[in-house]
Amino acid sequence: MATSLDWWPSPAKLNLFLHINARLNNGYHALQSVFQLLDFGDKLAFEVNTSSRISMKTPIAGVKDVDNLIFRAAKALQEASNTDLGCDIYLEKVLPMGGGIGGGSSNAATTLVALNHLWQCHLSIDELADIGLSLGADVPIFVRGHSAFAEGVGEQITPLNLANKYYLVVFPGCHVSTGEIFTHPNLPRNTPKIRLQDYEFSETHNDCQKIVCERYPKVANLLHWLLEYAPSRMTGTGACLFSVFDTKSEAERVLSQLPEECTGFVAQGVNRSPLYAKLDEI
Ligand SMILES: C[C@@](CO)(OP(=O)(O)O)[C@H](O)COP(=O)(O)OP(=O)(O)OC[C@H]1O[C@@H](n2ccc(N)nc2=O)[C@H](O)[C@@H]1O
Ligand SMILES: Nc1ncnc2c1ncn2[C@@H]1O[C@H](COP(=O)(O)OP(=O)(O)O)[C@@H](O)[C@H]1O
C-alpha cells in the first residue's frame, strides 16, 4: 500500500424507523424512514492515474471487483463525465456487510463525491445523486450528505436536524438479505403514511423487524437483551440493531457488556456527513 494515503470518510447510517407503505408495480416497496448518519464508518483513498484504469487495491473477500459498489460507482462516474482519468482505490472496511447500516451504499457515494472532486468532473450533487440511485436506493442519501426523512424508495429526501444522540450499534453475527425480507409473504406492506412534522421515535417502528426476529433467533435474543438497557430497534432490513443513549459513557458501558457472539460500536448521530467535512478541509 502507498505510504501516505488521503482517506475519505464513508459513514454508516441507521434507519431510526422503517415503515412500508405500499408494494409498487415494479416489485419494489414505497417506504418512509428517517436516515440518521453516524460519525463512524469505512474509509476510502484514491490515487488518480492518467491511464483511465480503475483498480481495487484492497478487494473485498467474497465480492468480485466488478460487483463492488465502489468500482461500479467509479465506472459510472467515468462514463457520465467522459473523463480519461482512472484511479487505484484503497478501502479500510470496518462496517459489517449486509447489516442494514449502508456500508456498500456509503462506499459508492464516497467514491462518487471524492472522484468528482479528484477528477474535476464538476457534476452537480443532483447529477451525482442520480448516478447513485442507479447503484442502490440508499446511495443518494449518502451523496447528499445529510440526515434525512426519506420517502418513495428512498429517493425523495428531506434533510433533517436530529438531536445528536449516541448509538450503540450491534451486529448479531448473521447476515440478512434485503431481497429475502422484501419478498416475504407476511411482510406488513400497508402502514399508513406519517407526516414528517409528526415524527417521534417512540411512535414509529420497523416493519421488517418482526419477520427478521422470527427467522433469525440471534436477532430476537439480542433485541430482547438490548431493550433491558435502552430504547432499541433493528435498522433497515437487519441484521444490525441499535440502542439510543443520551451520553457516550452509557452507550460504552452497555457495549462493554455485550454477549460474546456479538460485535458492536458506539457512534454519535450527526446531521451532516463527515464526507462533507472532509471536502470543506480541501
Ligand atoms: C430498505 C433499506 C433501508 O435502508 O434497507 P437496507 O438495505 O439498508 O437494509 C434500503 O433502502 C434497501 O436498499 P438497497 O440495499 O440498496 O436495496 P436494493 O439493492 O436496491 O434492493 C434489493 C431488493 O430489495 C427489494 N427492495 C428494495 C428496496 C425497496 N424500497 N423495495 C424493495 O422491494 C427489491 O426486491 C430489491 O431487489
Ligand atoms: N463496497 C461494498 N461494501 C459492502 N458491500 C458491498 C460493496 N460492494 C458490493 N457489496 C454487496 O452489497 C451487499 C449489501 O451491503 P451493505 O450496503 O453493506 O449492506 P446493507 O444494504 O444491508 O446496509 C453486500 O452483501 C455485498 O454483497
Image (cartoon, rainbow, N blue to C red):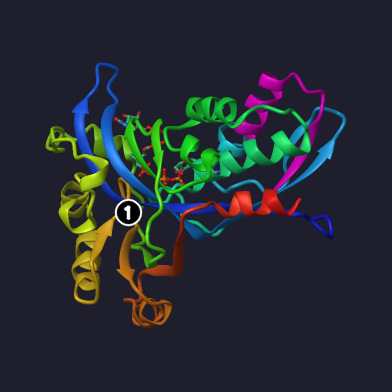
- Residue 19 picture quarter: top left
Give the residue at x 81% y 27%: 52
Q: Is residue 82 magenta?
A: yes
At 23% from the left and 56% from the top, the residue drawn is 201
Is residue 16 found left or right of 131 in the rendered image?
left
**Quarter-wise, where is residue 72 in the image?**
top right
Amino acid type, mark 1: Ala
Residue 221 % position (x, y): 20, 66
Location of the N terminus by quadrant is: bottom right
Instruction: Give the farthest residue toward the top.
Output: 25
Which class describes the residues within 10 Å of circle 1: few (<14), some (14-19), or many (20+)? many
Residue 46 highlighted magenta (yes or no): no
- Describe the element under mark 1 as helix, strand or loop: loop
Residue drawn at x 37%, y 34% is 154
- Give the magenta part as a residue range: 71-90
Outermost residue on the front side: it is 197
Residue under circle 1? 239
> Residue placed farthest to the right in the image?
50
In the rendered image, residue 128, in percent from the top left (x then y), is placed at 59, 29
112 above or below 198?
A: above
Residue occupying the point 71% across, 25% down: 78
Q: Is residue 135 left or right of residue 74?
A: left
Looking at the image, residue 108 lies above or below residue 254: above
Left or right relative to 137: residue 51: right
- Across and down, in percent, residue 24 comes to 24, 21
Q: Who is closer to the viewer here, 220 or 19?
A: 19
